[in-house]
Image: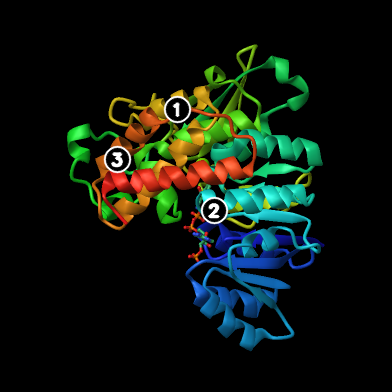
Amino acid sequence: MKQIAILGSTGSIGRQALEVIRSYPDRLRATVLTAHRNIDLLEQQIEEFQPLLAVVTDTAAAERLRARYAGKTRIRSGPDALVEAGTVAACDTVLTAVSGAVGIQPTLAAIAAGKDIALANKETLVAAGDLVMETVDKQGVALLPVDSEHSAIFQCLDTQRQAEVAGLVLTASGGPFRGKTKADLAHVTRADCLRHPTWRMGPKITVDSATLFNKGLEVIEAHHLFAMPYERIRVAVHPQSIVHSMVEYVDGAVLAQLGTPDMKLPIQLAFSYPERWQVVQETLSWEERHCLTFEAPDTDTFPALTLAYRVGRTGKSLPLVMNAANEVAVHAFLEEKISFLQIYETVETIVQRHRPQALRDIHDVACIDREIRREAKALLSIE
Ligand code: NDP
Ligand code: MG
């Protein structure tokens, strides 16, 4: 029985992970669950999965749950509770499915405690990639990608033949604004942005998909996960979201992983690996006619991708800075305080101002992250 801690069980990835766990009651157990604001859903999940530990951000909500589940599920809250969730002795695997850099500390703690990681929370790898990968190597744990593109590459990449790999091709849906011009983007709304054509995801990543920052974060994520230089990572826009990504070999062969756009496959594989288990989601139908198209990204309209490559190549603290500024700007956009185009403008301004410095440890990460959030909020004149 694999015992799993789900950090962010009330989110889009968290809920789909619980669907997978529900399909395999003899093999998987949700031992730890965590939520931020959605206490009602967490409570339903506690009722159904009876975890050892449940974590909420809000202390008052924790009090209420504690009274109700005394003697059954331990309830924790407070700043260290997510770290505790990632390091529970009974768990072997931690699914990091919180949104944003809040995942960094619990992920590092989980790795240090010897847990295998099913990584959905890409912001952690972008912001603290060198630190995370060093800790993974030191602890000898598995870091299994849940992001669909990285799961695809993981499935196609023959790590024994690294020298024969020419490069990686990350596919991108292009988001809801593919084909639009910069002028069109000046007036798009939150609702336009949240209408993603192929994937149903949480709000932050959906906005990232619209700006193409998501693909930029994924390029940096791929660089760390697969030790791949940036010049060998390319992006192809593939609006059908059926080819999840590809690996090119030196002889010109291209290996791809295909499937329906459904996160349950990469989530399940991260739990079952090295085995493959019976499918739980809908599969591709070969009776239908599929048209698969690929094109270059429009980086004039969506400059976030170019910025992310530049930031990734510079490294040091710059990816952390780009990520923190983007999180602040995306949240401000979601709260309808700034326009869509201001997201990129904010991130670019903050990135330009920053002098990259080495990240020695988690304290450096936390300190710069905090400072940049303050700076981005000041720039936008928000709280
Ligand atoms: P959601 O917004 O749907 O869920 C986020 C989860 O994190 C929720 O459980 C939420 O709790 C919790 N959370 C949010 N803020 C905090 C906080 N400050 N402290 C503690 N917990 C918090 O996001 P997604 O599931 O879409 O994405 C999760 C991660 O997975 C992201 O890093 C994303 O980039 C990545 N990912 C997602 C994909 C998808 O298809 N959704 C695909 C590939 C990667 P609550 O809901 O209770 O407030
Ligand atoms: Mg992805």
Residue appearing at x 23%, y 46% in the figure: 339
Tag 1 secondary structure: loop
Q: Amino acid at mark 3?
A: Phe
Question: Which residue corresponds to mark 1?
Answer: 355
Q: Nearer the viewer, residue 269 or 366?
A: 366
Give the Cα distance between marks 3 and 2: 28 Å
Give the Cα distance between marks 1 and 2: 23 Å
**Between tags 1 and 2, which lies in front?**
1
The label shown at residue 102 is 2
Residue appearing at x 56%, y 73% in the figure: 42
- Residue 72: x and y in percent read 73, 82
Vertical relation: 147 (above or below) 331:
above
The label shown at residue 177 is 3
Q: Is residue 211 left or right of residue 218?
A: left
Position of the N terminus, as image quadrant, is: bottom right
Does label 1 or label 2 sit earlier along the sequence?
Answer: 2
- Residue 7: x and y in percent read 61, 59
Residue 308, can we see it? yes
Position of the C terminus, as image quadrant, is: bottom left
Tag 2 secondary structure: helix
Residue appearing at x 69%, y 66% in the figure: 32
- Residue 163: x and y in percent read 71, 15
**Between tags 3 and 1, which lies in front?**
1
CB of residue at label 2: within 8 Å of ligand 1? yes
Q: Amino acid at mark 1?
A: Arg
Q: Amino acid at mark 2?
A: Val
Crowd rating for badge 2 (residues with CA inside 10 Å; few <14, some 14–19, many 20+): some
